[in-house]
Image (tube, coloured by chain):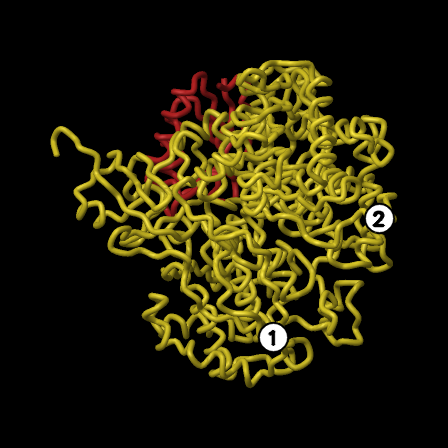
Chain colours: A red, B yellow
């Protein structure tokens, strides 16, 4: 299991679309700031492959200007 | 408080961390009700502060500990450096503690194989061999090679053991490979090492000029502060000057590509324009600057010659003006590749009195056969316009490793240095001897062997005992094949302390398992003179112990025990208190350990409870004498900063018909140095699992090479089969190649040239000549 959080910054005019797209991704929970165009994104993935797929999905979001990692819980033994 | 399920608790921590980071980045941001409070994140985990252990930015982190295991990381919102943020390395750094192949036991080579032994037996052997080598071959036959990843106590104990007790200045660190030209540049221009400003300059600057520094990858959190400064103030400009197009270039407002080595001419051309256009701050220059001419034609350190002696000559401003004549923009545009109009525009940014300017650089400037000169030239630009040592006006040399400054440069762990001094200065030697409790005659006034010279001495048998701690030189040295052979030479005894097996432990006679980062108490010092304390949070595995305590154990066995703390539980405190005595002056002090334990980090000098944010500025620095005016460059005997006349000189090796490409090696976001830690962090390893060779698409087309195809990369030092990447992270210009060096399975530094800056003795990894050979393929 991995739990991470991010700040997601939308491109101009893309906030609504981005919110919907992020919310539709598996394991993603989105909270929109009430007074700025900034999202808190919390992700939960069970496997490394799932996490990699999610990262790839982020790269394909046209309305995403920046994604800033702010927390990582990574209690998995590495190689 | 009712206990939450662990998963929900961690999600609360994740939400709270993101909210804290948002508050730091976007003032006034609100997320409404339902966000977890700080109390919701206190359950089960204990959170302890530590600086990140990777790059020299020095981000403050909070480490979540559960059942004696580090399980979570968040940026420390109290840390001024990063204001709650961290980069991908920082967030995943704790995984470096838990690789399956961690070294847990000491190893000794017997019959050609490394055999597990009790650690006491290994320490006995190290001490016995150290002593017998000194007895048979003299004190200069032994040497130590440490790291910018050392803690301050480890670097300090190494300096005291080698320079004070043994009397050998053969103490070096991998910082020589990354920052020696920065040290020599500071010393020759200002007389004292390390920046005069601090990261707070970013919040005051209007223009950022990045000199061959891919900050977006190498210093991502600091770069985010530049971007945030620009976001809040759209008139701010970021200028990227470099030899290839990188992620930094794409984020910059303006970019210019210059030819390798031509940075010397470019910097002088900017100075030419500042003088020609009347943009020089005459009052500042007359009050605070001296002009010096140094030796020229100084070679490339390709033999083990001693460092060049500068013997500077006084010259006048008019001499300097005449020197600059040959650097008129039109005269150097072909050499540099930068159009004259663009050079003039760059000069206008520095020359505009209404704009505050920061210049940033790191290894892209320092790893240069004229690295010291180039550091001098960048200071020249700032000194001519008086944009130095005041908020927002700041030439800023960045260090690459977590504690290159704190654990090596500050504590005297380079061959020429003492804590807060140099071995060649009698007063510095006497002060060190008094604090260390050794006769002053113990400290040799002659600098020891620099890193490359040290391995050359190993090659010829002049050094016979070498202890390497926390570094992986069998991946990171230039012209690597030569020094791998030297390390295997019969008669050489190598001790390697590390946390994981590496190509360097492969050639060791003794391997000592080291504690990593938060498995010990320690202190780091970052790029902006900030000292950062961390406590021991988890136990190291097996017999692993801190590098500092390994040194003390060996010192005790070698008969120097009375010079070092006897009690492991208090050794960091005792070492810090002793080290702080070197800085115990009325106007220059370090913070107490108790103060450092309370805060994420403190800038030195720390005098009467105040950090010194701008050294040499009489309004900020208690050591600066206002009798000299607004600034007092007290590091120099004339209380002035020195502008050096440093010409363009060609590189040691350049492309030709046989080797038509420039080859440069360097870093990537996900990996640090030789990669021994970051390659064991799955998310980082997966992102960039192997080294690769970047080439311009048109060059690839001309050679009929496809993306991902393996090619043979050849230089005069050897050849390597390596996959091609086109338009991956960065784009080298035509005729240029770039390869990251973190991958021990593709050791690209065996192809680089071991030419060094003859003043700083730092190698130039950025310029050698190479060719590409296609491998035969079925469809070719």
Evaluate whether residue B211 shows in this view. Answer: yes
* Displayed quadrant of residue B138: top right
Please give the chain letter of the residue carrying mark 2: B
Q: Position of residue B415 (x, y in %)?
A: 66, 49
Q: Nearer the viewer, residue B717 or B582?
A: B717
Mark 1 — on which chain does it sit?
B
Would residue B31 be found to the left or right of residue B429 on screen?
A: left
Q: Secondary structure at mark 1?
A: strand
Q: Which residue is mark 1?
A: B292
Query: Which residue is tagged 2?
Result: B433
What percent of the width, then of the height, locates residue B234?
Answer: 47, 61
Instruction: Please tell me whether mark 1 or mark 2 is closer to you in this view.
Output: 2
Q: Is residue B260 above or below residue B639?
A: above
Q: Secondary structure at mark 2?
A: helix
Quadrant including the N terminus of chain B? top right
> Which residue is rendered at x = 20% and y = 40% of the image?
B705
Dot 1 or dot 2, earlier in sequence: 1
Where residue B598 sits: x, y (%)? 78, 39
Residue at 43% in and 41% down: B749
Quarter assignment of residue A27: top left
User: How many numbered badges does the structure rendering display?
Assistant: 2
Q: Residues within 10 Å of mark 2 (few under 14, many from 20)?
A: many
| Nearer to the camera, B300 or B700 | B300
Q: Residues within 10 Å of mark 1 (few under 14, many from 20)?
A: many
């Amino acid at each position: 299991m991995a739990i991470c959080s991010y700040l997601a910054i939308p491109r101009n005019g893309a906030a609504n679309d981005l919110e919907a797209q992020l919310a539709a991704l598996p394991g993603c929970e989105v909270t929109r700031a009430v007074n700025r165009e900034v999202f808190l994104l919390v992700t939960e993935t069970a496997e490394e492959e799932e996490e990699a797929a999610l990262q790839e999905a982020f790269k394909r979001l046209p309305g995403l200007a920046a994604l800033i990692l702010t927390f990582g819980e990574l209690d998995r033994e590495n190689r | 408080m009712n206990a939450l399920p662990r998963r929900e608790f961690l999600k609360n921590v994740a939400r709270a961390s993101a909210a804290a980071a948002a508050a730091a980045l976007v003032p006034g941001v609100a997320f409404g009700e339902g966000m977890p409070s700080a109390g919701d994140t206190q359950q089960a985990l204990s959170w302890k502060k530590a600086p990140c252990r990777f790059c020299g930015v020095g981000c403050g982190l909070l480490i979540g500990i559960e059942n004696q295991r580090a399980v979570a990381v968040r940026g420390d919102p109290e840390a001024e450096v990063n204001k709650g943020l961290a980069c991908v390395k920082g967030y995943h750094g704790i995984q470096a503690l838990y690789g399956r192949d961690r070294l847990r036991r000491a190893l000794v080579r017997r019959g050609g194989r490394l055999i597990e032994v009790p650690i006491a037996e290994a320490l006995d052997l190290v001490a016995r061999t150290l002593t017998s080598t000194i007895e048979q071959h003299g004190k200069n036959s032994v040497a130590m090679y440490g790291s910018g990843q050392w803690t301050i106590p480890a670097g300090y104990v190494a300096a005291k053991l080698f320079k004070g007790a043994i009397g050998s200045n053969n103490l070096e660190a991998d910082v020589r490979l990354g920052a020696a030209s920065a040290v020599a540049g500071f010393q020759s221009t200002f007389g004292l090492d390390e920046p005069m400003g601090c990261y707070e300059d970013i919040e005051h600057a209007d223009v950022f000029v990045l000199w061959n520094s891919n900050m977006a990858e190498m210093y991502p959190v600091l770069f985010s502060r530049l971007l945030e400064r620009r976001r809040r103030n759209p008139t701010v400009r970021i200028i990227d000057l470099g030899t290839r197009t990188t992620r930094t270039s794409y984020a910059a407002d303006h970019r210019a590509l210059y030819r390798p080595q031509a940075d010397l001419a470019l910097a002088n051309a900017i100075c030419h324009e500042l003088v020609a256009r009347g943009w020089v701050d005459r009052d500042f220059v007359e009050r605070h600057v001296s002009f010096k001419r140094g030796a020229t034609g100084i070679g490339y350190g390709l033999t083990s010659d001693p460092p060049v002696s500068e013997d500077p000559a006084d010259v006048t401003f008019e001499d300097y003006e005449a020197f600059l004549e040959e650097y008129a923009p039109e005269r150097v545009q072909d050499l540099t590749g930068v159009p004259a109009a663009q050079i003039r525009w760059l000069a206008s940014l520095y020359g505009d009195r209404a704009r505050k300017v920061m210049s940033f650089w790191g290894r892209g400037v320092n790893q240069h056969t004229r690295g010291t000169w180039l550091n001098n030239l960048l200071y020249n630009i700032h000194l001519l316009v008086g944009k130095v040592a005041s908020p927002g006006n700041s030439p800023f040399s960045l260090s690459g490793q977590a504690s290159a400054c704190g654990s090596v440069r500050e504590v005297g762990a380079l061959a020429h240095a003492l804590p807060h001094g140099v071995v060649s200065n009698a007063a510095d030697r006497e002060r060190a001897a008094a604090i260390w409790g050794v006769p002053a005659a113990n400290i040799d006034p002659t600098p020891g062997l620099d890193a490359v010279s040290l391995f050359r001495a190993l090659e010829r048998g002049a050094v016979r005992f070498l202890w390497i701690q926390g570094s992986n030189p069998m991946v990171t040295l230039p012209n690597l094949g030569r020094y791998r052979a030297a390390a295997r030479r019969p008669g050489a005894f190598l001790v390697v302390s590390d946390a994981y097996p590496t190509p360097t432990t492969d050639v060791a006679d003794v391997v000592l398992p080291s504690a990593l980062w938060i498995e010990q108490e320690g202190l780091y010092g970052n790029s902006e003179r900030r000292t950062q304390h961390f406590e021991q949070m988890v136990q190291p595995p097996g017999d692993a112990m801190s590098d500092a305590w390994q040194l003390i154990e060996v010192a005790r066995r070698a008969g120097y025990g009375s010079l070092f703390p006897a009690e492991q539980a208090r050794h960091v405190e005792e070492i810090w208190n002793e080290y702080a005595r070197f800085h115990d002056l009325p106007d220059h002090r370090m913070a107490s350990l108790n103060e450092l334990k309370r805060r994420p980090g403190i800038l030195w000098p720390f005098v009467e409870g105040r950090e010194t944010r701008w050294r040499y500025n009489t309004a900020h620095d208690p050591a600066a004498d206002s009798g000299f005016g607004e600034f007092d460059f007290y590091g120099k005997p004339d209380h002035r900063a020195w502008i050096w006349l440093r010409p363009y000189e060609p590189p040691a090796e350049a492309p030709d018909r046989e080797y038509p490409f420039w080859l440069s090696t360097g870093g990537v976001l996900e990996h640090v140095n030789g990669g021994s830690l970051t390659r064991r962090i799955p998310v980082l390893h997966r992102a960039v699992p192997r080294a690769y060779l970047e080439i311009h698409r048109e060059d690839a087309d001309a050679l009929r090479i496809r993306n991902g195809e393996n090619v043979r990369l050849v230089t005069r030092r050897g050849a390597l089969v390596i996959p091609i990447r086109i338009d991956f992270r960065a784009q080298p210009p035509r005729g240029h190649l770039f390869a990251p060096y973190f991958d021990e399975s593709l050791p690209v530094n065996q192809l680089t040239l071991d030419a060094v800056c003859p003043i700083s003795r730092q190698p130039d990894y950025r310029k050698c000549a190479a060719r590409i050979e296609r491998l035969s393929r079925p469809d070719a």
